[in-house]
Amino acid sequence: MEPSDKHPNLEKDLTRVFGFSRRAVIESNKCAPFPAGCGGDATEFRDELSRKEYSISGLCQKCQDTVFGE
């Protein structure tokens, strides 16, 4: 999947703070690694809004449900 666009400096800051590349995780169709997410596959989403959220946060459907509620 294609990650949402973010300013390059923000991408660098996110990588530094969280310890992983948000872009690389999303491009590999994986969920963000623990503790941000579960690190599992991120290929099935409930709807288009959940798919869009994945392109922003890198959280799979299960982790989105945990963070935001179903």
Image (cartoon, helix red, strand yellow):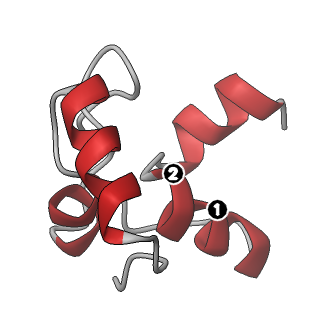
Identify the image quadrant of residue 20.
top left
Q: Which mark is residue 57?
A: 2
> Picture coordinates of residue 42 (x, y %)?
36, 58
46 is higher (above) or lower (below) than 30 = below
* Quadrant showing the C terminus: top right
Residue at left offset 59%, top offset 66%: 45
Element type where label 2 sits in the image: helix
Residue at left offset 83%, top offset 30%: 69
* Quadrant showing the N terminus: bottom left
Q: Which mark is residue 66?
A: none
70 is higher (above) or lower (below) than 19 = below
- State the residue in front, 43 or 1: 1
Q: What residue is disc 1 on?
A: 53
Element type where label 1 sits in the image: helix
- State the residue in front, 18 or 60: 18
Callout 1 touching callout 2 (CB < 8 Å): yes
Give the residue type that dot 1 points to: Glu
Q: Residues within 10 Å of mark 2 (few under 14, many from 20)?
A: some
> Picture coordinates of residue 31 (x, y %)?
32, 46
Looking at this view, name the residue that lies furthest to the right: 70
